[in-house]
Image (spheres, grey):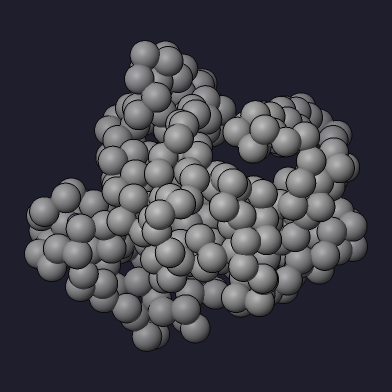
């Protein structure tokens, strides 16, 4: 397998790293991966990641397709309720920050197209990119939204979009800075960028350490804390305008982490520590399991 070793920190350009944690890929392969830490800014990076041509098999157990549209059974009902709730919350965040009820939106890494379809139903003109062909086919057939492959981002005209969204996507990119440049090019001067990312400064990350489900190696290459997100975008011509908590992620990630620890009863323990994380995040957004960041383009920069 061809691997990539990242030698330069994309946040501060530092070149010195120390070992941070060894994490297991609980989801697919069972393999172990080292997470290293930039000694200058503290940013965490998964070491020796499979390159873009080799990482495909590590996504094979992704359950997105199997989360079918059935709402039978209590677990599916909770899942569907949570998904609908989050779609509505994300739309409200977009509408409020764009000061527009409709407009042109691009969802990068749109998956099976649930958010894209939701925004389309609410009158937005929606485009979406997605790397997985299976997910694109599902989106077209079941959600009636046409997504283009990931490289499609390079084809959009300058200043096209009022809103660009990346919901839990950027941590997967091999080349995040290249994406940030493209996003800046195609975002309208008055447009807003919305990024959701796991937060390894969260209470639940600190509690679960190497079994924290959102480390999700090797699929998650970059492990952001709020200060790193702000810095990497500021370095590339954006300003942070707002942050939001994603409280449901505290529960979801805690339950997944308990499952990885093989604790019993995983559901109840996850619920308890999810609730602790949720309470901590009420006092401090920067401790929430996942955070939504809103950015605008700096007008002075090119
Ligand atoms: Zn650094």
Q: Residue at x 35, y 29 (%)?
A: 286
* Left or right of 256, for residue 43: left
Q: Residue most toward the front?
A: 300
| Residue 287 at x, y percent in the picture | 35, 27
Depth order, front residue of 298/228: 298
Q: Residue at x 76, y 46 (%)?
A: 103
Depth order, front residue of 40/183: 183
Q: Residue at x 49, y 27 (%)?
A: 245
| Residue 170 at x, y percent in the picture | 47, 57
Residue 101 is drawn in which quadrant?
A: top right
Depth order, front residue of 238/254: 238
Can see residue 164? no
| Residue 19 at x, y percent in the picture | 14, 58
Looking at the rendering, in which quadrant would you find the C terminus?
bottom left
* Left or right of 252, for residue 2: left
- In the image, residue 180 above or below residue 122: below
* Left or right of 55, for residue 122: right
Q: How many marks?
A: 0
Q: Residue at x 10, y 55 (%)?
A: 39
Residue 15 is drawn in which quadrant?
A: bottom left
Can see residue 74? yes
Residue 258 is drawn in which quadrant?
A: top left
- In the image, residue 225 above or below residue 298: above
The quadrant of the picture showing ligand 1 is bottom left
| Residue 49 at x, y percent in the picture | 35, 71
- In the image, residue 95 above or below residue 130: above
Looking at the rendering, in which quadrant would you find the N terminus?
bottom left
């Amino acid at each position: 397998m061809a691997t990539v070793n990242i030698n330069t920190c994309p946040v501060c350009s530092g070149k010195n790293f120390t070992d941070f944690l060894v994490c297991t890929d609980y989801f697919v392969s069972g393999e172990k991966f080292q997470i290293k830490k930039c000694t200058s800014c503290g940013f965490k990076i998964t070491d020796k990641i499979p390159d873009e041509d080799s990482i495909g098999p590590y996504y094979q157990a992704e359950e997105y397709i199997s989360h079918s549209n059935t709402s039978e059974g209590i677990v599916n009902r909770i899942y569907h309720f949570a998904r609908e709730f989050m779609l509505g919350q994300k739309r409200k965040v977009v509408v409020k920050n764009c000061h527009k009820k409709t407009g042109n939106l691009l969802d990068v890494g749109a998956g099976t197209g649930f958010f894209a379809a939701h925004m389309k139903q609410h009158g937005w003109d929606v485009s979406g990119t997605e790397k997985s062909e299976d997910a694109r086919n599902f989106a077209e057939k079941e959600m009636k939204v046409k997504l283009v492959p990931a490289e499609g981002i390079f084809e959009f005209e300058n200043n096209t979009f009022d809103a660009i969204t990346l919901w839990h996507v950027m941590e997967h990119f091999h080349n995040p800075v290249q994406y940030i440049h493209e996003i800046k090019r195609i975002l309208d001067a008055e447009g807003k960028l919305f990024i959701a990312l796991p937060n390894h400064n969260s209470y639940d990350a600190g509690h679960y350490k190497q079994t924290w489900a959102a480390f999700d190696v090797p699929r998650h290459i970059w492990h952001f804390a709020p200060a790193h997100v702000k810095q990497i975008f500021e370095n590339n011509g954006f300003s942070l305008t707002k942050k939001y908590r994603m409280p449901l992620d505290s529960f979801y990630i805690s339950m997944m982490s308990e499952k990885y620890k093989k604790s019993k009863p995983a559901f109840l323990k996850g619920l308890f520590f999810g609730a602790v994380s949720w309470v901590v995040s009420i006092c401090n957004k920067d401790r929430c399991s996942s955070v939504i960041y809103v950015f605008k383009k700096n007008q002075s920069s090119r």
